Image (cartoon, grey):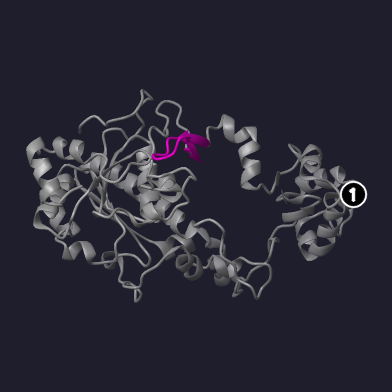
């Protein structure tokens, strides 16, 4: 593999040497390939001539006159290189074939059958690149792994959250299912796909043979909601929204503070004893009606009232002083409070990157997986549309004059 073009001298990540052809757009696919890029893989983002649809989504900086991309695109496409191809042309498809033949991994999130119709079925590509790992993330999976009756349904985050069971156990009461705030119906499947791809990478090193990696968004969400499966199987219970409580543990949830809310999670009786003492209710630590988790679950409202008698008259900072380090505890943060907390600074989780078209840098979320010897990193901002077309095509043997001719023919940009 060719050396990756990088903007600074940060150490190469653990996946350096892997080349990924990224045909994804929106959130699930790009989030997966960004994780690979964060850890050193050379990710070539292949876009339509008009670019990934999230480029125009925003938000944009107030002084950004270029508007090549906004916050959405910047947040999930860092560390990648971009080439724009017209896959409606035979020449554009030929270029893509050459890119894939030199790649270790291809990832796409089109509807089932789209790539097959373009001539890029996994079975076709593996004939010339038997080591190829072909990763897909779709709403209801690929028919190769089991054809869902919904295989042709389009899907976004809210669809997989709904059908995967997540919304059905989230909400203020049993009658009000609620969407989870972040796009976990996309990002959870993205993480699952990343794990699958890396498992396949390990297998290639052992056997020399690639394989097809398929993740359905709904399947991934259901896997994360595993509790609803065993509850139904063991007891016949159909789980429902429980607000900020837990059906099996108490106290375990959110509690009112004077300036917001805090989370407290006492999954053991030992933690409950420490909490009871800290809130001035040592009597509840030894009272048989509250001393065990099973007893507390039966008397959840009384437990909540006792805790909120303490928390509701104190600020989040005051509660942190009283409980922090003693029991599992955390204040419910706004994004502004996250920006102010030193934890996220020392963990490099708020990273400054250049925003083309703006005079000042912007912040995006950093790399959460910390490796001691081959750390992942935000090495460069998200790419402008076609920013790396020349170097990518040059890397697979296209001469400068031919690249210019392809641009004039609007095959590449």
**Residue 152 x %, y %:** 31, 73
Q: Residue 249: within the magenta?
A: no
Task: Confirm whether residue 64 shows in the render.
Answer: yes
The answer to whether residue 399 shows anywhere in this view is no
Residue 217: percent from left, percent from top = 41, 62
- Look at the picture and state if 354 lies above or below 64: above
- Residue 354 is a magenta residue: yes
Question: Label 1 crowding class (10 Å Cα cut-off): few <14, some 14-19, many 20+?
Answer: some
Q: Position of residue 42 (x, y in %)?
A: 28, 38
Question: What residue is disc 1 on?
Answer: 281
* Front position in the image: 258 or 290: 258
> In which quarter of the view is residue 246 placed?
bottom right
Instruction: Identify the magenta region.
Output: 350-367
User: Would residue 257 be found to the left or right of residue 400 on screen?
Assistant: right
- Front position in the image: 286 or 79: 79
Where residue 131 appears, x then y in whole percent? Answer: 19, 45
120 shown above or below 76: below
- Above or below, 190 against 387 in this view is below
Q: Describe the element under mark 1 as helix, strand or loop.
A: loop
Q: Residue at point 15% right, 53% down?
A: 125
Identify which residue is drawn at 81% across, 39% down.
322
Asked if residue 373 lies left or right of residue 333, the reply is left
Q: Residue at x 40, y 40 (%)?
A: 357
């Amino acid at each position: 593999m060719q050396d990756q073009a990088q903007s600074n001298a940060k150490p190469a990540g653990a996946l350096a040497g892997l080349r990924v052809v990224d045909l994804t757009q929106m959130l699930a696919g790009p989030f997966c390939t960004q994780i690979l890029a964060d850890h050193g893989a050379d990710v070539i983002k292949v876009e339509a001539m008009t670019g990934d649809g999230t480029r125009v989504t925003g938000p944009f900086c107030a002084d950004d006159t270029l508007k090549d991309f906004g916050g959405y695109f910047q947040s999930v496409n860092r560390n990648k290189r971009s080439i724009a191809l017209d896959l409606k042309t035979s020449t554009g498809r030929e270029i893509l074939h050459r890119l894939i033949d030199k790649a270790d991994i291809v990832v796409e999130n089109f509807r089932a059958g789209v790539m097959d119709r373009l001539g890029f079925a996994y079975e076709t590509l593996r004939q010339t690149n038997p080591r190829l790992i072909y990763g897909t993330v779709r709403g209801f999976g690929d028919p190769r792994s089991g054809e869902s009756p919904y295989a042709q349904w389009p899907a976004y985050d809210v669809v997989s959250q709904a059908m995967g069971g997540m919304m059905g156990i989230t909400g203020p009461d049993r009658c009000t299912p609620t969407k989870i705030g972040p796009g976990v119906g996309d990002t959870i499947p993205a993480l699952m796909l990343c794990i699958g791809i890396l498992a396949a990478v390990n297998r290639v090193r052992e056997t020399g043979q690639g394989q097809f990696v398929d993740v359905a968004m709904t399947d991934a969400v259901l896997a994360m909601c595993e509790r609803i499966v065993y509850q139904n199987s063991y007891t016949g219970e159909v789980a429902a929204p429980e607000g900020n409580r837990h059906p099996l543990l108490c106290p375990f949830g959110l509690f009112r503070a004077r300036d917001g809310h805090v989370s407290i999670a006492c999954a053991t009786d030992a933690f409950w004893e420490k909490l009871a003492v800290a809130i001035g209710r040592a009597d509840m630590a030894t009272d048989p009606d509250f001393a065990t988790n099973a007893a507390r679950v039966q008397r959840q409202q009384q437990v909540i009232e006792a805790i909120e008698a303490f928390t509701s008259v104190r600020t989040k900072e005051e509660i942190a002083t009283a409980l922090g380090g003693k029991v599992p505890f955390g204040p419910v943060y706004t994004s502004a409070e996250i920006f102010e907390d030193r934890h996220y600074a020392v963990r490099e989780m708020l990273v400054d990157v250049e925003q083309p078209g703006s005079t000042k840098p912007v912040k995006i979320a950093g790399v959460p997986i910390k490796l001691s010897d081959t750390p992942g990193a935000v090495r460069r901002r998200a790419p402008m549309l076609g920013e790396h077309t020349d170097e990518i095509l040059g890397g697979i043997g296209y001469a400068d004059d031919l690249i210019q001719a392809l641009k004039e023919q609007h095959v590449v940009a």
